[in-house]
Image (cartoon, helix red, strand yellow):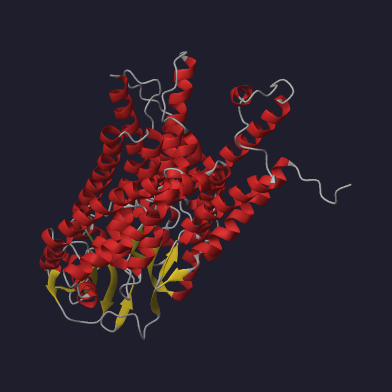
Amino acid sequence: MSLFSFSEISIITIMIALSSVIGIALGAVKYKGVGLGIGGVLFGGIFMGWLAQKMGWIPEFSKDSFDVLAAGGVDVVKTAKSVNEVQCFKHILHYVQEFGLILFVYTIGIQVGPGFFASLKGSGVKLIGYAIAIVFIGASIALSFNVFFGLNLDSTVGIYAGAVTNTPALGAGQAMIGDLVNGLKEQGLSVPEGFDVKNVASAYAVAYPFGICGILLTMLLIRFFFRVNINAEGEKYELQKKSNRKDLNTQNVSVNNSELFGHKISEISVLQNGKVGCSRLKRGNILMVPKSDTVVYAGDILHLIGEKDEDLNEACSFIGETVQVSLTTKGTDLSVRKVVVTNEKILGKSLDALEIKSKFDVAVSRLIRTGMEFIPHSGTVLHFGDQLNIVGRKESIDAVANVVGDSAVAMQKVHMMPVFVGLVLGMFLGCLAIPVPGLPAALKLGLAGGPLVVAILLSRYGHVITMGKMHWFMPASGNSALREIGIVLFLAIVGFNSGANGFVDTLIGGDGLKWMGYGVFVTFIPIFICGILAYKFSKINYLSVCGAMAGSMTDPPALAFANGMYKNSEASSLGYATVYPFTMFLRILTPQLMIVIAYALMSK
């Protein structure tokens, strides 16, 4: 009697875990700072799939069809159980693979969503334009291999996805080909050659390594050809960032307008339009927090806050004259502190409804929400994660903090209901089918595109849609954990399936080397051309260009390489985040468009 009795679930779990362990260890190996990163899991999966098939630890993947067995002269009736075992094994793997992909793209959308719309300004628009060009040039090159060189469509799609290191593109391509095959079979039509989902994964794995190395090579070549000074580029970016910063401006003004003497703050028109606020008032040597019913007198000094200099200047001209006097809280009984809204009971309520100003004798001078800073007014509704800049006495600020929450623990908690609401909505959007005339399968965003788009929208507008009752804030640690679990599951199983389906034989004795050569063109040509144009002709900062190139290939290892060039990684990280959502969406869509075009040409 055997010591262990393994079920299908236990075997699959062990295979995935071993694939992940080997792959993560392989990805951690670096040569001069360059490594496979999370992409190593794909190759760990390939090794485990090959080994498991050779050692007989799993059912033989080739025996997954009655047709295959019948063609080999096997009695299918006697082997029906064996076929069912293989199919069941594959179905479980497929579900876990797709669920991993869904988790990965959803958490990416949640991560980049809040800053996505703000990035659509200045050089961000140019970077997005170049990223779009990179996507379509690469897709066109890949499709030309099918149209002009007779490369099978399944191999074409796999080479494209691997060459641009985009896992969701692989998933979308596999799903589209699978839908096409099922549609043809339902209509009683024969399936043309080149519609084998297995070949998509094999071609992807072959093209993937240069997909990673090609981006790094392009960054280095542009740097070499144009003799880029990294430190100078970094300093140039920081200067540009300071000149573009839209922080709130402040001015101190002395009340000299006699028409305002004896009037309440609430009666001063320029302080009630939402453009300018007053957070402090100094009368003699006394610094206080002004309320709406605070009366102003001659010589009072008001600390004004506004988004635009012209609004502040207009207010100062009406109230009196600008003075260079410090209204710092140091040495006084007042202090300034940021508190974070984490109390779910007050979400959706306004500052006025909570009576924060009147009840606690404090001023809310500014509010920071998803990276955007603005002046709050009495009707401003609070959302989870809002940062309130409070001016007042320490005990008053502590009381406000108790009301709004200000809990570090709550900020680190992943709220699961919004996650699953987002996944449900993502599934509905992803499964929305757009019929294409003459094509057996409809065009759709799929399991990768739907959750991504929904996550971006909900992370930015979800709290507004739900009137502040539900939020899609996710702490960085929780987001990273879900994202890494998702991509590891997906890559491990993609690799495992490839290894079990004869990837090694394809690479050594089949078309593997030819596929690799095709992949070099898809990887290198688009990013090299667009990288030069972006840096030399559009005058975009080199570090931002490197980040955008990594983002256009949705390649975290390339981003890590770009981030390591300069002490401050903000330029490359922001370039990556700016183009990533557009690129990810297009990478998911382009394999489907390639299949639609190729099938249409094939049908003529």
Q: Is residue 43 left or right of residue 296?
A: right
In the image, what residue occupies the spot 85% across and 48% down? 2
Which quadrant is the C terminus positioned in? top left
In the rendered image of this protein, does residue 348 appear above or below residue 185?
Answer: below
Image location (x, y in percent) of residue 559: 36, 62
Q: Residue furthest bottom?
A: 331
In the rendered image of this protein, does residue 366 appear above or below residue 593?
Answer: below
Q: Observer-nearest residue: 75 or 25?
A: 75
Image location (x, y in percent) of residue 289: 34, 71
In the image, what residue occupies the spot 60% across and 52% down? 48
Image location (x, y in percent) of residue 9: 70, 43
Q: Is residue 481 left or right of residue 536?
A: right
Image location (x, y in percent) of residue 538: 13, 58
**Which quarter of the figure has residue 7?**
top right
Q: Observer-nearest residue: 402 or 59?
A: 59
Q: Observer-nearest residue: 189 or 54?
A: 54
Q: Residue furthest right?
A: 1
Q: Is residue 279 left or right of residue 529?
A: right
In the image, what residue occupies the spot 31% across and 67% down? 570
Residue 512 visible in rendering: yes
In the rendered image of this protein, does residue 601 appear above or below residue 38?
Answer: above
Q: Observer-nearest residue: 345 or 87?
A: 87
- Total tally of numbered discs in the picture: 0
